[in-house]
Image (cartoon, rainbow, N blue to C red):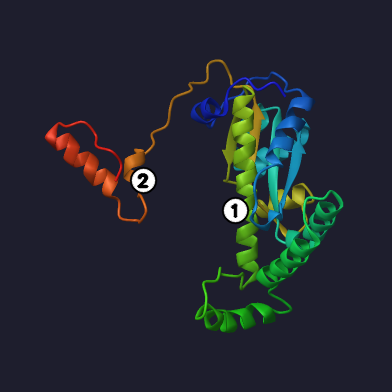
Amino acid sequence: MHTHLPTPEAIQQRRAVRRFSSQKVRDQLVYELLELSNRAPSGFNIQPWHFVLVRDQEIRGLIHHVALGQKQIIEAPITVVFAANQRAWKEEFPRIIKSSLTEGLMSKEYARYSAANVRAQFRTGPFGFYGFAKRITHPLRRLSKPLADPFYTADEVRSYSRAQTMIAASTFMIAASGAGLATSPIEGFDERRLKKLLAIPSHFSVPVIVSLGYPLETEESLDSYRIPLLDKLSVDVFPNKLSRLKAQNESKNEPDKQLP
């Protein structure tokens, strides 16, 4: 793929576009963007995302209806529905382990450890029994050493899969910006109707829809306000000393000091 912009510029120039031109996007370019999205990181490398690429105008019209009439879905030539599989840890992860071993990307020892760790972290059933047991035993085990929180309920596994899928969606939007395309992330839609429309299985959820295309030439590409970094950054510990330091420097009309 011929990237038009380096990554920092692609991130800086990415905007949520509301109006798209009718210019088509090459299929090969869309697939390349999805390949990059598929390279997104995920906890345990479980990769719980699934991409539903919608090009058909009639289907996009139906998505437009269940997405509360947001016009970018019918204007943009491409819509990607990002679906999150909360069963990926048991449906997809064994394949990931097997392929990693076959391609020499993982040792047998680490494969056994990883498979056992994922089962221990994600398993909650049957009927929530394992989740309940972990809720009792985990605080006791934590008394002797630091431990990451496991998943106690199916809802927590669902939230995990949605969060990881959003990383893939973000990667997709940055890659699209680098290729000179515009995107519009959409979170306002009737998920139940959307899943029924696209035949998405019940154990998937949909955290976001992304419309993709070339922006309308008359579309204003205004920057969006961001809270200054110094107001959002703490060094070493949470108390934000940087913002106070900046205020002190400004009051004294002195140049900024080095970060503590």
Q: Quadrant of the N terminus?
A: top right
Disc 1 target residue: 163
Q: Is residue 62 above or below residue 101?
A: above
Q: Nearer the viewer, residue 208 or 195?
A: 208
Q: Which type of secondary structure does the marked residue at label 1 adopt?
A: helix
Indicate the amino acid at tag 1: Ala
Residue 164: x and y, percent? 63, 52
Residue 60: x and y, percent? 72, 35
Measure how far apart labels 2 and 1 are at the Cα level: 21 Å
Indicate the amino acid at tag 2: Lys
Q: Nearer the viewer, residue 189 or 212?
A: 212
Q: Residue furthest top?
A: 217
Disc 2 target residue: 232
Residue at point 74% right, 36% down? Answer: 35
Picture disc at residue 227: none
- The answer to which of marks 2 and 1 sits earlier in the sequence is 1
Residue 91: x and y, percent? 80, 61
- Depth check, mark 2 against mark 1: the one in front is 2
Residue at point 49% right, 28% down? Answer: 12
Q: Is residue 27 above or below residue 129?
A: above
Q: How many marks?
A: 2
Q: Nearer the viewer, residue 145 or 67?
A: 145
